[in-house]
Amino acid sequence: MNSKKKKVLFLCSHNSARSQMAEGLLKTMYGNRFEVHSAGLQPTEVSPYAIEVLKEIGIDISNNISKRIDIYKDINFDYVATVCDQARESCPFFPGKIIIHKDFKDPSNTKGDIVDILHEFRRIRDEIKTWIEQNFKDDV
């Protein structure tokens, strides 16, 4: 097997929740095989709820920052993964050998108290984890 890590870019609207969770999960689960990045179309800031629900499972993304996709324009990725429909539809062409997509509901739009919000962030975290296992475990 080639010892060079494959490059992965996760894209979503704001690079605040879904793509950040995907980045943290893939780095932790299969970081020995992948160099992982994430970015957004209109980056804001990393959601404190995303930080919290990953911390619950032993993953620290508290030092992550929200990044704009432009910073990666000159990198050839092995995988470009869009985690929301807006990113897939609005994303400029990104050279990737494999393009994968899954539209995850944006947990940042959850209304209610902190219990409701954290519940939704956990649900999306777990969906993303399962999706990563299905798509990256055996290297697609």
Image (tube, grey):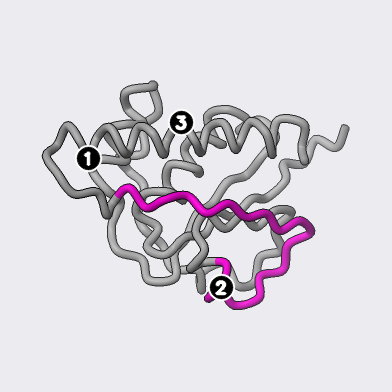
Tell me where residue 54 sits by quadrant: top left
Q: Image quadrant for the N terminus?
A: top right
Residue 121 sits above or below residue 30 on the image: below
Q: Residues within 10 Å of mark 1 (few under 14, many from 20)?
A: some
Q: Residue 89 bears which disc, if any?
A: 2
User: Label 2 near label 3: C-beta < 8 Å?
Assistant: no
Tell which residue pokes out farthest to the left in this image: 113
Q: Amino acid at mark 2?
A: Glu
Tell me where residue 31 sits by quadrant: top right
For label 1, the residue is 117
Question: Upstream in the sequence, badge 3 or badge 2?
Answer: 2
Tell me where residue 21 sits by quadrant: top left
Question: Upstream in the sequence, badge 1 or badge 3?
Answer: 1
What is the x, y in percent for residue 68?
43, 68
Q: Secondary structure at mark 3?
A: helix
Question: Upstream in the sequence, badge 2 or badge 1?
Answer: 2
Q: Residue 126 bears which disc, if any?
A: 3
What is the x, y in percent for residue 139?
76, 37
Quote the CA–CA distance across marks 2 and 1. Answer: 27 Å
Q: Amino acid at mark 1?
A: Ile
